[in-house]
Image: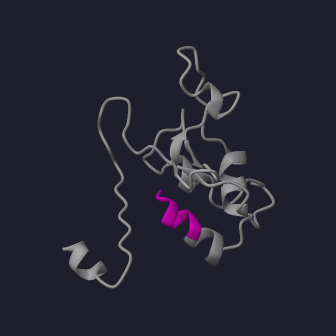
Amino acid sequence: MSLFLLLQLRNRLSLWSTNRQDPRPRWHSSVRSSGGRANVYALRWENERTGKSGWAPAVRGGPGNARKPDREYLPLSDEVVAAHLAGSIHAGLYPLLPNDTCRVLACDFDGNGWALDAL
């Protein structure tokens, strides 16, 4: 599921299930079947001094450990998705699976020329 679709879920649906037998959020099964990797997710970073920003794999111990050879990637969990939907973090999916296949593709076209860019 793309971040765009996750944002749509946040804006259009109640985040919590009304089924008393299943207390998990409504988005639980959608995220689990998204086609992205569950063993790692991306976090958005921003350097206030330089103004640069980007995405990097979430690792135990924070961004300072990202380049260490023994880094441990953090899995995409219900808590991570809930934090993303609540707006406290910006999380991303890695759609390229370990076997180099991909089951999801998301495109974002902005600005006045978005229709031409989409062609």
Q: Nearer the viewer, residue 31 or 92?
A: 92
Residue 16 pos. (x, y %): 75, 64
**Residue ranking furthest to the top:** 70
Q: Identify the residue at horizontal 72%, vertical 54% (top origin).
A: 83
**Residue ranking furthest to the bottom:** 112
Q: Is residue 47 left or right of residue 113?
A: right
Q: Nearer the viewer, residue 106 or 24?
A: 106
Q: Identify the residue at horizontal 28%, vertical 82% (top origin).
A: 113
Q: Identify the residue at horizontal 62%, vertical 59% (top origin).
A: 27
Q: Is residue 83 left or right of residue 116?
A: right
**Residue ranking furthest to the right:** 20
The image shows residue 27, relative to residue 37, as above or below, that is below
Residue 3 pos. (x, y %): 51, 60
* Magenta residues, start to end: 1-7
Residue 102 pos. (x, y %): 32, 44
Residue 5 included in the magenta stretch of the image: yes
* Residue 98 falls in image quadrant: top left
Q: Nearer the viewer, residue 83 or 113?
A: 113
Q: Main secondary structure of the magenta part?
A: helix
Residue 105 included in the magenta stretch of the image: no
Q: Identify the residue at horizontal 40%, vertical 45% (top origin).
A: 95
The image shows residue 51, relative to residue 38, as above or below, that is below
Residue 37 pos. (x, y %): 47, 39
For the C terminus, which image quadrant?
bottom left
